Amino acid sequence: MNDFEAKKQRAAELRQIIEYHNKKYYENDEPEIEDFEYDRLLHELISIEEEHPELSTPDSPTKHVGGKADSQFSPVEHKVRMESLQDAFSFEDMRDFASRVSETAGGVKYVVEPKIDGLSVSLEYENGVFVRGSTRGDGQVGEDITHNLKTIASIPMKIKNAPSFLEVRGEVYMPKSVFLELVREQELEGEKPFKNPRNAAAGSLRQKDARVTRKRKLDIFVFNVQQIEGETLSGHKQSLEYLRSLGFNVIPFYKECSDIEEVLEEIDRIGSVRGELSFDIDGAVIKVDSFEKRLLLGSTSKFPKWAIAFKYPPEEKETTVLDIEINVGRTGVLTPTAVFEPTLLAGSTVSRATLHNQDFIAEKDIRIGDKVIIRKAGDIIPEVLCVTAHGEGSVPYVMPEFCPSCSAKTVREEGEAALRCLNPDCPSQLLRNLIHFCSRDAMDIEGLGDAVLSVLVEKGMVKTAADIYKLDYEKIAQIERMGKKSADNLRAAIEKSKSNDLSRLVFALGIRHIGQKAAKLLCSRFGSMENIIAAPKEEINAIDGFGEIMAQSVVDFFSLSKSRELVSNLKGCGVNMESTQTVLDRRFEGKTFVLTGTLSNFTRAEAGKIIEDFAGKTASSVSKKTTFVLAGEDAGSKLRKAQELGVTVISEDDFALMIK
């Protein structure tokens, strides 16, 4: 194979690999490789296409931004394209960029600022009022996420002394402290944690339920004026100062530089402090300041020629694995954690990293005593990259056959990577199970958070969920930072939880594979805890929305004597065991509704409740199984999909007649 054929084959491979990772990063919010590795792949493809233009294809990822609008959100066409940036990996790349700028525009000033690692969004204001927010998408068409953006406190809903129209661009991010707390909660719940803050921010912002977005405590830095009417701006630095005067949370620091050497000094400075910042960055952005010079420089089909992003390589260090510890999560999953010699990495000292599961350990052949290379994924979470040398006399590590907390035999279920302890009395699972039991979506016991429950478990006051309903409130009042008032408030919250609907209790029990929706379906079908416990697997499996694994999980849970004993104790404490879901009649039985657009006479929650009261169910996406699409004003992609599939579309007036 000659050199040209080899590069042709490599270009085709790179296009396929890059598009795969584009989908994982932009659309699924589940990146599999680090940004630096992705940028290297893209840079290699750009080099091949520049050397051999005939190998460039119209749909090459070098010609478009990676993402595309998700069909679950209404599309927004960007009048001013939200461009991506060309990447630089060395000071030589930076000097080449400056030479190209100088050849076209002559002498220029640059503005250097940190490159926030988050999700790029557009914010639009009419006469000072926030009217629409959207994602970048593919640069031309994004997604309307206005409702979710309104949950971010630092985005002004109204601005004073505003121009008649203003569109700004910013980066929504998750602060490092918020990210670490979220990961801790996910690990407690046995959920797969987000990999890095960018992934967490994107997953939180592209939620259909804005309440989830609000809970994630996102923030934003605004860094660009996209469009403006009623005000004239001549440069980037001036525009940032103008945006700050309007009340926007502008990019935290930036510096005007007179030449490329000053730019390189600032890049070095930002790189030296990146580990100390409260937010994650993956580089520095260098922009020509003058808007007039930017027009002269123009853009390629993908990148502006007046800006570039310098990408910092992830810092890697070698250390020694001193031990491998096993932690047991709420759902019984055993998670191995490497303990290594404390090492200064990306601005902080690290000494631990999760090893995920047996497959991960075996794939990298990680053993106690090994020399390993570590880095921080997304500059936050330490991870083991590879083994450089096995320790003398080391042996392959094998996960324990018995739970280190309760000595019960561990199992690895078919199709799962995780090893699991199934003992419901396992001490390591107790606190995590109690936290879940008391959480807002379960029994919703205000005042019984992580800290208080930890103290109650430590003092031996709570050993099962039923013990929560037998607490001695005089002893509670004597606990540090509690007092009589806190104890009385806690008593009221616990008493109130006794009357919760049965579906909340079923969800609170933490049955594997049974979430809130499944718990509601289960209780709606059987009506009482007694009936659920007695129900055969076949009847549970027959519930629309259930499957064999879910049904088996319910049967397995209630077949345990400890589970039945817990339910009996909860009942003895006065906890409700009957479903309070009322079905007025069964006119919508077997029918599935999808709600879209803005409803005038109901909230979506109210309409959904009405449908459930008539034995129907709601779904979040349109398919051939959908019976009706209830479309309000500004219905978007779901309405179009319903029309394509021939699904019956009804108006609010139609719905009102159906529920008379």
Image: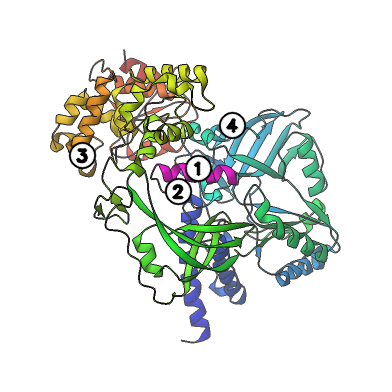
Q: Magenta residues, as a range? A: 176-189
Residue indicated by mark 2: 193
- Taking the spot 27% from the left edge, 58% from the top edge, the residue there is 401
Q: Distance between the residues labelled 3 and 4?
A: 39 Å
- Taking the spot 56% from the left edge, 46% from the top edge, the residue there is 141
**Which secondary structure, mark 3?**
helix
Residue indicated by mark 3: 551
Image mark for residue 150: 4
Q: Nearer the viewer, mark 4 or mark 2?
A: 2
As displayed, is residue 21 above or below residue 150?
below
* Majority secondary structure of magenta residues: helix
Q: Which amino acid does label 4 sit on?
A: Lys
Q: Nearer the viewer, mark 1 or mark 3?
A: 1
Q: Residues within 10 Å of mark 4 (few under 14, many from 20)?
A: some
Measuring from the top left, give residue 44's x and y in whole percent.
Answer: 57, 71
**Which secondary structure, mark 4?**
loop
Residue 459 is inside the magenta segment: no
Q: Which amino acid does label 2 sit on?
A: Pro
> Marks 3 and 1: in contact by CB < 8 Å?
no
- The disc, 4 or 1, on the residue closer to the chain's N-terminal end is 4
Residue indicated by mark 1: 182
> Marks 2 and 4: in contact by CB < 8 Å?
no
Q: Which of marks 3 and 4 is in front?
A: 3
Quadrant of the rendering where the C terminus is positioned: top left
